[in-house]
Amino acid sequence: MRACIFAGVLGGLAMASPAFAADVVAPMAPEAVPVAAGQWTFTIAPYFWAARISGDVAQFGAPEVHIDESFGDILNNLDFAGMAVGEARNDRFSLFGDVIYAKISSDAATPRGIVAETVNLTTSTFVGTAGAGYSLLKSDKGNLDIVAAARVWSVDTDISFDGGILNGLSISDSQTWVDALGGFRAVYNITPKLYLTGWGLVGAGAADVDWDVAAGLGYHFNDRWSAVLGYRAIGVDYQNDDFVYNIVEQGPILGVAIHF
């Protein structure tokens, strides 16, 4: 069974509030637009993440299985996905967040159709990150921020049976947990238009380890719009009784940010 596959790899909803992208549109990158002292700046950025997923998962008391799904595999079964980031910043202080949601469904016929004619699997995953940062270094060339954050994971899986002995039966398994993260994020302006951005976070909590790293190259079209192309990887290792979720997601990321 292609069990409990984490879907979060496609992009596209803007989220309003201090969230997880910043002036450079890449998640976790600090605002670098010069503003008057004491003023707040805000950034909202939907993004697209063409990630693959690999690792080990287990649910419903079933044995642990290894998964290795390409972006194309996930896309074939994707019902919906939304991702957005943003930031609120005042001088050296910042608030940020990141929201990822994805829903995957698939169905398959059973060999003889006695126990059930078809089995339907639906998995939805939510990952939300919120935190605060402080610029250790800040100049017209960019920022280096130290950050602390909390990340919420929620994984829900439903299996339903049509036809056969188990016709109409549905079972569910879900887990929600929270991890604390810390690390750095930075942006460096190569030119007034072109910049580099990156971040690294690691932590734990309910999970044994939770981490997030990325790097990207961005471009300012004007004071209002910018875009970034880069590569991001997220990993988590969570186990609770028979529930196992030890996965790594990684792939190219593309985002567009609105600054105000």
Image (cartoon, grey):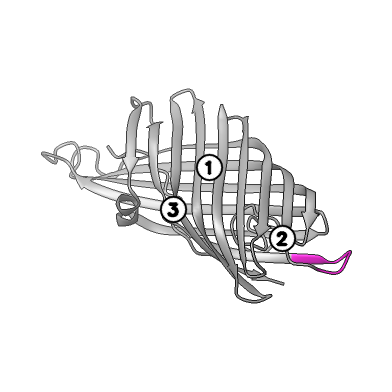
In this view, which residue lies farthest toward the front? 191
Instruction: Look at label 2 and name its amino acid.
Output: Glu
Residue 70 relative to residue 163: left or right: right
Q: Which residue is mark 3?
A: 9
Q: Quadrant of the C terminus?
A: bottom right
- Single out the mark in the foreground, 3 or 1: 3
Of residue 189 and residue 135, the one placed in the foreground of this image is: 189
Residue that mark 1 sits on: 154
Q: Residues within 10 Å of mark 2 (few under 14, many from 20)?
A: many
Amino acid carrying label 1: it is: Ser
Task: Determine the CA span between mark 1 and mark 2.
Answer: 29 Å
10 Å crowding of disc 1: few (<14), some (14-19), many (20+): some
- Label 3 is placed on what type of residue? Val
Please give the range of residues in magenta.
Answer: 35-41
In terms of secondary structure, where does tag 2 sit?
A: loop
- Local SS, label 1: strand
SS type, badge 3: loop
